[in-house]
Image: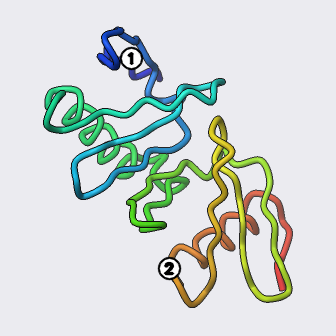
Amino acid sequence: MAHWVKLSYERQDYVVDLDGVSAFAWTLSGRITFWLPDSALPIVINRQTNPRDYQTLLNYIDLAAASALGSTWLRLSYDRSEYAIDLSRIRSFCYTPNNKLTFWLPDSSLPIILTQQNDPEAYQKVRDFILRKTGQILP
């Protein structure tokens, strides 16, 4: 089911299906960033300059995380930002002998590197997702 919204960014209007967005990042300073589907173009919505679109995105993030599909969404704090990531859109994971899990956000090429020490809950959720979706057991 599509969730189309109209957003203003840099004096242009975008009509975006938010269901096609694979990840959102936001900061306490009031910025939400997402990458247009099938593009590396980041869209940054600022709470002060565009409060309506900012709230639209926050509402969607909460809705996606709470929906039946929410089980594939991962929320985590990483690199001074909060992220909501749809794990079902991730196409590769890397596991290293020192227990690091790495994956790359689609459409942005941004790596997310998790360790059991820095975020045990997110680390375990990603491991469980990998097992459930691929049948592969990580050491």
Q: Kindly identify the amino acid type of the residue bearing the numbered disc 2.
A: Glu
User: Badge 2 local density, few (<14 within 10 Å), some, or many (20+)?
Assistant: some
Q: Residue at x 29, y 35 (%)?
A: 57
Q: Position of residue 107 (x, y in %)?
A: 64, 35
Along the line of sight, the residue nearer the viewer: 124 or 100? 100
The residue furthest front is: 10
Q: Position of residue 93 (x, y in %)?
A: 78, 61
Q: Residue at x 47, y 23 (%)?
A: 1
Q: Kindly identify the amino acid type of the residue bearing the numbered disc 1.
A: Trp
Q: Earlier in the sequence, mark 2 or mark 1?
A: 1
Query: Which residue is the site of mark 2?
Result: 121
| Figure check: 112 above or below 110 | below
Residue 132, image quadrant: bottom right
Q: Residue at x 66, y 72 (%)?
A: 128
Horizontal relation, residue 56 to residue 77: left or right: left
Query: Which residue is the site of mark 1?
Result: 4
